[in-house]
Amino acid sequence: MKAVIENIQHFSLHDGPGTRTTVFFKGCPLRCLWCSNPTTQHFGAELLQKADKCLRCGACAAVCPQQAVHMVPGSLPQIDRSRCINCGLCTSSCPGKALIMAGQEYTLESVVANIAADMLFYRNSGGGVTLSGGEVLAQCDFAVALCEECRSLGIQTAVETSGYAPYENLLRLSTVTDILFMDIKHANAEEHKRLTGMDNTHILDNFARLLRDRVEPVHVRLPLIPGCNDDDGHLAAYAALLAGMEGNFDLEVLPYHRLGKNKYEMLGREYALGDTPPLEEERVSHAVSVLRAGLGRIPVLCTA
Amino acid sequence: MATTEKTRLDRVMQLKSQFFSHRPSVCIEGALSKTEVFRETESEPMIIRRAKAFRRHCETKTITIQPHELIVGNAGAVARSIHVNPELSNNWFYEELDTMSTRPQDPYQITDEQKRQYRELVYPYWKGKTLRDFWNARAPQEIRDLVAVGGVCDNDVKIECTPGDMVPAFQQIILPLGFDGIRRQAEEHLATLDFNDIENFARRDFWQSVIICCEGFSLLCERHADAARALQVGADEQRKADLRRIESACRAIAHNPPSTFHEAMQLVYFVFVGLFIEGNAGGYSPGLLDQYLLPYYEKERAAGTSDEEILELIECFYVKTGEQIWYWNEPAARHYSGYCAFQNIALGGLDTYGRDAVNPLTYLMLQAGIDVQMVQPSLSVRISKKNPEAFFLKVAELVQTGSGFPAVFSDDVGYKMLLKKGIPAHLARDWAPIGCVEAQLAGRHYQWSSAGHYNLGSAVEFTMTNGIHLQSGKKLGLETGDPATFTTFEQFKEALFAQLRHLLHQFSVSQNMLEELHYQYLPNPVASMFTTGCMEKGRDLTHGGAEFNTGPGMNGNGVGDFVDSLAAVKKIIFDEKRFSMAELTAAIKADFKGYEALQRALEEDAPKWGNNDPGADEAMIAMCDVIIREIDTYRGKLGNHKLPALYPVSSNVPQGMSVAALPSGRNAGRPLADGCSPSQGQDRMGPTAILQSLGKLPHESIDGGTLLNIKFTPQVIQGKEGLARISAFLKTFLDLDVFHVQFNVVSHEILRCAQKHPEEYKSLLVRVAGYSAYFVELSREIQEDILSRTAHEL
């Protein structure tokens, strides 16, 4: 069994307790404007260009079967993304390592071997593995198999999902993972569609069903994005929406950061949020207090 | 007035600001009095002359007691003054008289009067009589050339210094006996002497020297008691009470063993004052302080003394340790920068019988490290799975300060190192790290942990140049053939290991010369009377007096560079045949100019040490195997086994300046990897992979010491989660049998360096929920975001 994985990061500090290894799945059905991992959106491997490493030698242009690379004197090679088929030939010929592929196919065995190397760290810290992305559920069979394999090795797992997937897949994964994080990014269906490309009806429906079926808590996450979902009106509506749900869940606020901006440059894409600065601390704590006011006994956490 | 947390911390603040108000300066009182003594004693044995010089300085030196102090004393006249030993440093000290106050690294203030006195009264007597002069006259020419070129082998640490590498025998000798007790033992031995045994003349000289040194110590204590008494006149009530305590402690220990915690702490401190008077050295280490002071602590607590009072004394002691300077000439000050004397305190771990040794004093001594946060003392912890979780968390709290302390050691690996050195199992648990990371049996052991460094990077360079040191153009290595003609990896590897063995051999010859010179010219009665075995045998340390003799450590720089070079040549040149040996050879000479593609391939496509990558880890094991087997055949003056050691820290920078470009992809002149840490920026897989790689080293066979530095960004260690994370990390460190680790918290400054030298900081990971990226790959603007955050967090 195989999956396209963008990165396996060891010694992760977030997205679950203890010392963790995070497996970033590649491919996502949503297109959130603020996405900090745009290299995980596209299904399949994808070409990245690191400007500072380019030796301007022209090897990429020479080898490209699609004639997608144009050399411009005194400047970086221009990549015509509409012609590029992400075949990766240029990356193996690039002497400067300026061109690399984001994502590669992994077998289940190789991912498990990679993860299991840190067994002692999980044991000593109460940590484990986090499946992140991208959308984990877009490669559901692999994700389920990976969680099962981890469970048989005694490795705890956590999953991060947008919840945008057929419910039976969500449920299958929920039953084999210890910790489940699920994003609800906006309370309003139309706004959700504008911000992420899909409306939230299906996600909310999945969430409600999951609350009925899952015994362990669901950890809801709200990425707090300036100008998108951080106004008091939305926050009050958001709190009201969650307060109306029945089941075992809590809420975590993830404040916006723009650390993913350079990844857009490497992909030759524009960053939709442009120069939007990170949120002030006071703004974040204000948002948390608005949410708390509306959510009553439901815990609201914030990871700055 | 009772000591409270507030009065204690106020005192520490005052002591610290007083400390930083002293600019390091020169004291030549000792140099002047030693010159007098030596002029008066030309016909006497060297050990007696050195003992008399020690006593004279104790008798005549300026005594200073500073405001706010509870623990008192200095080897020089005042705090942070260098006590000049002309028999070691006469030549350079004379040459640098006019420049030492303005030199860029570690300057020393000196007055015109001091310069005049040194020129007229000290220099002429010692001219031609220093260890440096003896080295110049007697070391083999080939070895002198090798050292003189700079950066391939250095050995100043045993030409300019006495052997400081020791923990005095507090438990066995000093605390139970006191100075009169030691003196009585020497007197008893003297009373039984029969000179029909010819060895007894030397023994007589040794025991007499011990008596003279004990007299010196008694004088030193009494003179401080007198000074504390004199200062009481006119002092305010609070200070008067302090001074009475100082007076009484100094008076009590002038002849007899200590009975209070204050007396014991002051005695420990005076022992180090005495050692620094005897010799200029780094590494004089307190060792297992929380264990041997415990009886005094328990007695005091039972008598009603508070923890605050005890903690205050410990903190006063910590500030004092930083006042003593291990002084250096200008070039060497770059190797040993920061006025630091590497006085290592080892807390926690297991006791002699293998039981948990953590006690209430351990926690107070860690808390003192958190409160004081100065470069000295070097705080270390020995950790064991038998230690309680509270101890691990307290250690984590000290890591959190970002001070770089404590150095963390696996108690079990240290114990095994001592077994390898031939120490019996029933004693070996009392090991302590001294200096940086060198395991010794506290109080019973004579071991030069360092006699300089050799450069593993040079061995690689010589393989690529057929023995030529490119920077100087001199032939310093073996002729192992033109590397461009190598057709198999085995050929390359054999040439490289031949260069390595040759370098080890030459470095060992240099050490032998030094041991021979110390044997003849530099007996150390003070250090000897504080080491078990010397009294019974009537013999100085340099003559084999100690109960156990091992060393010197043979300390290699550039571990990561050597290993990465070996792994890169295998993969890129021979396995994948992407470039030829001829190209590599040319690229090295050209410092990769015009060979950028080759350099990138070496840097990015080859396995690197510290990533749990079998390709590099195997190269490491192969290198260690050669070093361990080769050094296993080397013996020193006393039949002592020499020790493989891979722990250099700051000398990786100056030694790097001497090394050409390497097949690892490193450019000429850049710093080498420090200790056993991965090469700069090459730890792409993060801290878990670093530990796993380090776990593959045969640490107990590298019994001169191994060293690992890990950089953590602040978010890794902050908060309660951070404490738990560090504690868990240390348990895995134990599980993997790694010997040492120290944590550097990535500061604002380090991130600024990363902006300037991104290639050396490639592995700095920015960790945020659901996201990861390398710092150096972010745009300037985003880097500035992180910089502003980091400044805030620190």
Image (tube, rainbow, N blue to C red):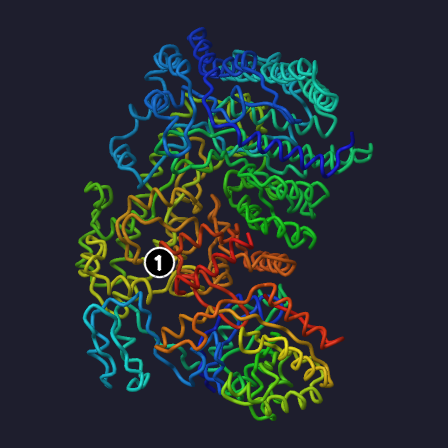
A292 on left or right of B504: right
Q: Residue furthest top?
A: B40
B248 on left or right of B751: right
**Residue A133, can we see it?**
yes
Q: Chain of mark 1?
A: B
Q: Residue at x 63, y 69 (%)?
A: A302
B171 on left or right of B114: right
B42 w.r.t. B102: above or below: above
Q: Position of residue A148 (x, y in %)?
A: 59, 83
Q: What is the three-letter code of the residue carrying label 1?
A: Glu
B469 or B705, which is in the foreground? Answer: B469
Crowd band around label 1 with a 10 angstrom C-alpha radius: few (<14), some (14–19), many (20+): some
Q: Residue at x 45, y 6 (%)?
A: B40
Q: Position of residue A48 (x, y in %)?
A: 35, 75
Q: Quadrant of residue B372?
A: top right
A157 w.r.t. B719: above or below: below
Q: Residue at x 46, y 55 (%)?
A: B697
Q: Which residue is mark 1?
A: B759
A241 w.r.t. B665: above or below: below
